[in-house]
Amino acid sequence: MSLGENIRDSSKRRYQSTYVIGGKNQGKSTYLRDQADSYLHNLPDRRVFIHDVSQSKAFADLPIVSLEMIERGTWKWGAARNTSLDYQAVHEVLSTFYMNGMVVFDEFSTYVKANPPAWQRYLITNHRNKGIDVAYVLHRYKSASVYFGALIDNVVCFKTKETGLKLEDFEKRFGDPKAVFEAYHQIIAAKPTNSWTQPHLMVKL
């Protein structure tokens, strides 16, 4: 099942947590936009919240949703983005007021802590109870938090600028470090394409 796919029957759904890992200009945002569109095609009565810190071109046509709109419940459906740099406020509002949708945290690796505080941990441990599929964007494999390791369901692997990574660099960071390590090597060997989205693999953990 891809990140953007899911089924209507909530009793049979499996809410997913996903890392999307890759360097700049690999097409991570384009990939996530495609997944968001697919998600809403399958579940048109749901919402996709994108924390668009980098203000990517892939999300530029989406409307802005304020945290106040989420708190008041005035945003009902569709995809929207928020560009706030108050990371803690974004996480806390979503943790308290957001349910039944997809959440994408762009640039997560710029602020996630090795020992994440409670506001960074809440959704990864409670997203299924809230009916949320959640994606975290990282620029490096070594940015993956050990705390999140066993809680992540999927890893979408793009190329990064990291070189010489060893299996030990993946251990504890991922539920199946060998599978992610092997995918990393396959992607490193892949030839670039002319499309916006460069070669990538999804690893199910």
Image (cartoon, rainbow, N blue to C red):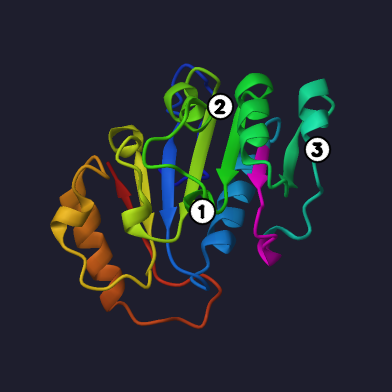
Q: Quadrant of residue 39?
A: top right
> Which residue is disc 2 drawn over?
8
Q: Is residue 71 above or below residue 85?
A: above
Q: Quadrant of residue 41?
A: top right
Residue in view at x 65 percent, y 46 percent: 51
At which x and y percent is residue 49?
Answer: 67, 40
Instruction: Mark yes or no: residue 10 visible.
Output: yes
Q: Is residue 108 left or right of residue 40?
A: left
Front residue of 123/112: it is 112
Say which amino acid is labelled 2. Answer: Arg
Say which amino acid is labelled 3. Answer: Ser
Instruction: Mark yes or no: residue 75 visible.
Output: no
Q: Quadrant of the N terminus?
A: top left
Q: Earlier in the sequence, mark 2 or mark 1?
A: 2
Q: Earlier in the sequence, mark 1 or mark 3?
A: 3
User: Helix, strand or loop at disc 1?
Assistant: helix
Front residue of 138/75: it is 138
Q: Is residue 38 above or below residue 186?
A: above
Residue in view at x 57 percent, y 51 percent: 106
Say which amino acid is labelled 1. Answer: Thr
> Alpha carbon of mark 2 to alpha carbon of mark 1: how far?
34 Å
At which x and y percent is residue 134?
Answer: 51, 37
User: Helix, strand or loop at disc 3?
Assistant: loop
Q: Is residue 105 above or below residue 67?
A: below
Residue in view at x 83 percent, y 22 percent: 72
